[in-house]
């Protein structure tokens, strides 16, 4: 899985369409796959893109010449002799009007937004760090209304799914269900909308790199 994420970086996933293509191909590591599945729950209209990509992939498979198995009976016997994976029990996400996390994300982290054990990183910015998973660094973030994130670029790729609230940068506006796809070609300074905090889920494969002037950086850190 880690190798698939590295391959994604090298192939420059810089659009939502290219991310969905990797999702359909099954090459995303678990955190990125969960992020896409949560996005599709919040933006079900994009399921059409996924279904179309799956149909195209199916057509490609039909054109591939079949390959004979070297020892079909032994392979079948090994499958039948293997133990079934243990079923994991997870609490079902409560269905309420104030629920923030889609089911895919709830199942992944085990709780909803109200129960996140946030830690303050700087004024107006809180984070819950899930650590490194399959070569990705994964976290949830909370930004107060009007907060500006220090200008930065990326040494690799970063996927950010907005779960509540919204933010804007030089590329556009991102609201609930939207995914920001950024790489080393993007240098941005996201700013949260007024009115409500912005909560998101981020998956990245390399650290951020701060940019901008020293004066601007200090102002943004202080908030």
Image (cartoon, rainbow, N blue to C red):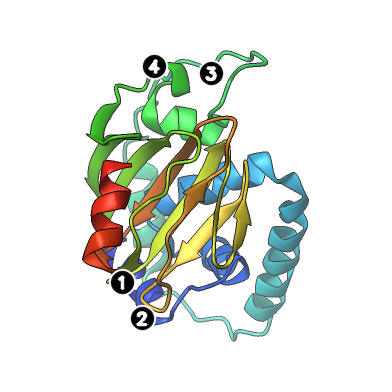
Q: Is residue 43 above or below residue 26?
A: above
Q: Earlier in the sequence, mark 3 or mark 1?
A: 1
Q: Nearer the viewer, mark 1 or mark 4?
A: 4
- Judge depth for marks 2 and 4 and give the one in front: 4
Helix, strand or loop under label 4? helix
Give how far apart the Cα atoms at labels 3 and 1 are: 32 Å
77 or 5: nearer the viewer: 5
Q: Are marks 2 and 1 in contact (CB under 8 Å)?
A: yes
**Could you tell me which secondary element the residue under label 2 belongs to?**
helix
Real-space Cα distance between discs 1 and 4? 32 Å
Q: CA distance from mark 3 to mark 2?
A: 36 Å
Q: Which residue is mark 1?
A: 6
Q: CA distance from mark 2 to mark 1?
A: 6 Å
Closest to the observer, 116 or 86: 116
Camera-side residue of 4 and 45: 45
Q: Mark 4 or mark 1, which is nearer the start of the sequence? A: 1
Q: In the image, what residue occupies the spot 25% across and 61% down?
A: 215
Q: Earlier in the sequence, mark 2 or mark 4?
A: 2
Front tag of 3 and 4? 4
Looking at the image, which residue sits at the far front?
215
Location of mark 4 (residue): 115
């Amino acid at each position: 899985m880690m190798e698939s994420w590295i391959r994604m970086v090298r192939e420059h996933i810089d659009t939502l369409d290219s991310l969905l293509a990797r999702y359909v191909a099954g090459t995303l590591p678990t955190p990125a796959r969960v992020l896409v599945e949560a996005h599709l729950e919040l933006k079900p209209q994009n399921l059409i893109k996924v279904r179309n990509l799956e149909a195209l992939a199916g057509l490609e498979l039909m054109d591939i010449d079949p390959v004979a198995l070297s020892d079909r009976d032994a392979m079948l016997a090994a499958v039948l002799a293997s133990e079934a994976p243990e079923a994991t029990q997870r609490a079902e996400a409560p269905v309420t009007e104030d629920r923030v996390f889609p089911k895919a994300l709830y199942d992944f982290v085990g709780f909803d937004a109200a129960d996140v054990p946030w830690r303050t990183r700087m004024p107006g910015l809180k984070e819950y760090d899930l650590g490194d998973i399959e070569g990705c660094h994964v976290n949830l973030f909370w930004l107060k209304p009007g907060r500006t994130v220090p200008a930065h670029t990326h040494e690799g790729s970063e996927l950010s799914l907005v779960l509540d609230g919204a933010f804007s940068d030089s590329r556009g506006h991102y609201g609930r269900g939207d995914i920001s796809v950024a790489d080393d070609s993007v240098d941005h300074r996201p700013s949260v909308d007024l009115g409500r905090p912005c909560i998101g889920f981020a998956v990245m494969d390399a650290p951020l790199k701060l940019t901008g002037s020293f004066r601007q950086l200090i102002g943004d850190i202080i908030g």
